Amino acid sequence: MYPLKFKTIFKSVVWGGEKIAPFKGVETDQHNIGESWELSGVKGNESVVAEGELAGKTVAELAAEYKGELLGQKVYEKTGTEFPLLVKFIDARDDLSIQVHPDDKLAAERHNGSEGRQRCGMSFRLTRRPTSCQV
């Protein structure tokens, strides 16, 4: 499987800023972009492959076709075709209120989540377009 590039999903919100599109080098008429979803398995907002022979397929379709080869066997056994990640940039024009998220049990009941799910977050202030990034 070749390296996959996905179409970005821009989310305009009341609190959104104007920095994400220029940061990504994208021209758009969309304003107040608060979130740029880079990779999403959220139902109704699944990422779509942008180029190559798999162009047009959603991450759910890829998970159904490639199963453990795409997700890893243990993750596929746990999540099936529901892609388990949401990777996004956030641009808030002002400080936001504290977010309260459900615990694992409530998420499993109401949001089709699973108990023991992994969480990861990263925050930085964008002052200029980076020239390189190392992980």
Image (tube, rainbow, N blue to C red):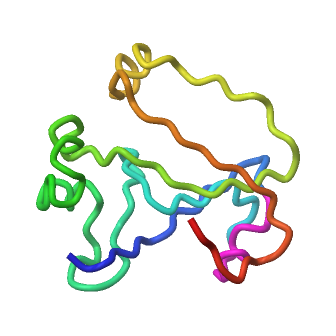
Residue sitting farthest toward the front: 135
Q: Which of the two residues, 60 or 134, is positioned nearer the viewer here?
A: 134
Residue 10 at x, y = what percent?
59, 62
**Residue 133 location, x and y as percent?**
63, 73
Q: Looking at the picture, tell me which residue is in the foreground, 21 or 103.
A: 103
Q: Horizontal placement of 34 versus 45: left or right?
A: right
Q: Would residue 28 be counted in the magenta stretch?
A: yes
Which quadrant of the figure contains the N terminus? bottom left
* Residue depicted at 21% across the width and 35% down the height: 78
Indicate whether residue 129 is drawn in magenta. no
At horizontal 86% and vertical 69% (from top left) the residue drawn is 127
Question: Seen in the image, is 47 located left or right of residue 80?
Answer: right
Q: Quadrant of residue 126?
A: bottom right
The total number of labels drawn is: 0
Residue 131 coordinates in the image, percent (x, y): 71, 83
| Camera-nearest residue between 42 and 87 | 87
The segment highlighted magenta reads 17-29
Q: If the image is split into quadrants, where does the C terminus sit?
A: bottom right
Please name the residue shown 66% across and 80% down the image: 132
| Position in image of residue 67 (x %, y %) | 14, 54
Side of 121 where 65 appears, left or right: left
In the image, residue 83 sits, relative to residue 115, either above or below, namely below
Which residue is drawn at the image coordinates 66% and 77% (left, top)? Answer: 28
- Asked if 100 appears above or below 123 in the picture, the reply is above
Residue 76: image quadrant is top left
